[in-house]
């Protein structure tokens, strides 16, 4: 007659087998989600460089990148990677639940492509046309971010810090984001980053576009409901 130990070992084997089977079933889905992370990273990198290059200052986090790049002699992509690495390290210590494989993949692809795209954009001398390109860049940046966010493979480095502080301390995430944005912009400006119209537009436009993009991606690309 099987002992209690035999029952426990059998249950453990069954659980392990179920986990392995689930992992095999989910493998294509994971690969698809990571592919979407890569595409979203590329679109975001193209968009942010298009917006910054238009000459109306930097986006919220880009102001800090510019300041770090100028202070330490780095490229914009290297500065974005350095800032993200610090934020990821903070989140790993403070609340590691926020970090996933997508977090790392996004930042590697994004950081490399920011440098690659920085010199490819063409602008005209008319400020209205350049402002239109800036707006297009912001929309592309936010759409790519929403595509990445829809995959649920880990938060972006900046979002990880925001949600870590919010969830660990019980603070409203909206207030934490406003305070984080203000801190990042002020620090970036002190280091030599450029404030301007792009900074304001990024703060006003990004949220709604990210939300819409993420919703569409979940519904049409990932088969999830609203």
Image: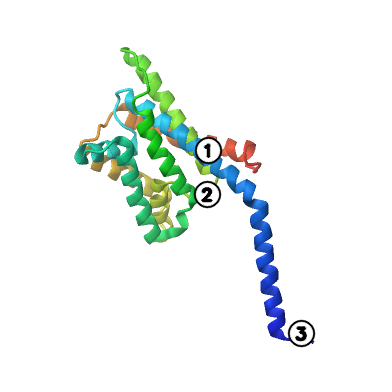
Q: Quadrant of residue 121?
A: top left
Q: Residues within 10 Å of mark 3 (few under 14, many from 20)?
A: few
Q: Quadrant of residue 197?
A: top left
Residue labelled with disc 2: 153
Tag 1 secondary structure: helix
As displayed, is residue 41 above or below residue 4? above
Tag 3 secondary structure: loop
Residue 163 visible in image: yes
Tag 2 secondary structure: loop
Is tag 2's residue or tag 1's residue first in the polypeptide sequence?
1
- Residue 170 point in image, percent of width and height: 42, 58
The reply to whether the C-beta atoms of the residues labelled 3 and 1 are less than 8 Å apart is no
Query: Which colouring convention does the figure follow?
Result: rainbow
140 relative to 122 in the view: left or right: right
- Residue 5 point in image, percent of width and height: 68, 84
Q: Say which residue appears at 20% left-offset and 40% top-offset.
A: 71
The reply to whether the C-beta atoms of the residues labelled 3 and 2 are less than 8 Å apart is no
Front residue of 44/134: it is 44
Residue labelled with disc 3: 2
Q: Say which residue appears at 28% left-offset and 40% top-offset.
A: 64
The quadrant of the rendering that contains the N terminus is bottom right
59 relative to 140 in the view: left or right: left
Q: CA distance from mark 2 to mark 1?
A: 11 Å
Q: Quadrant of residue 141?
A: top left
């Amino acid at each position: 007659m099987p002992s209690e130990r035999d029952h426990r070992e059998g249950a453990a084997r069954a659980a392990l087998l179920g986990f392995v089977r689930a992992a095999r079933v989910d493998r294509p889905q994971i690969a698809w989600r990571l592919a979407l992370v890569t595409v979203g990273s590329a679109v975001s990198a193209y968009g942010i460089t298009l917006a910054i290059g238009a000459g109306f200052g930097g986006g919220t986090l880009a102001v800090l990148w510019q300041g770090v790049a100028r202070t330490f002699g780095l490229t914009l992509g290297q500065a974005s990677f350095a800032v993200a690495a610090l934020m990821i390290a903070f989140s790993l210590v403070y609340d590691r639940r926020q970090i996933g494989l997508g977090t790392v993949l996004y930042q590697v692809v994004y950081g490399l492509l920011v440098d690659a795209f920085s010199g490819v954009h063409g602008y005209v001398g008319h400020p209205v046309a350049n402002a239109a390109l800036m707006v297009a860049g912001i929309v592309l940046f936010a759409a790519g971010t929403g595509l990445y966010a829809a995959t649920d493979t880990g938060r972006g480095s900046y979002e990880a810090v925001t949600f870590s502080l919010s969830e660990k301390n019980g603070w409203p995430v909206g207030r934490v984001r406003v305070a984080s944005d203000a801190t990042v912009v002020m620090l970036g400006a002190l280091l030599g980053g450029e404030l301007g119209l792009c900074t304001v537009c990024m703060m006003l436009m990004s949220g709604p576009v990210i939300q819409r993009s993420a919703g569409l991606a979940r519904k049409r690309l990932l088969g999830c409901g609203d």
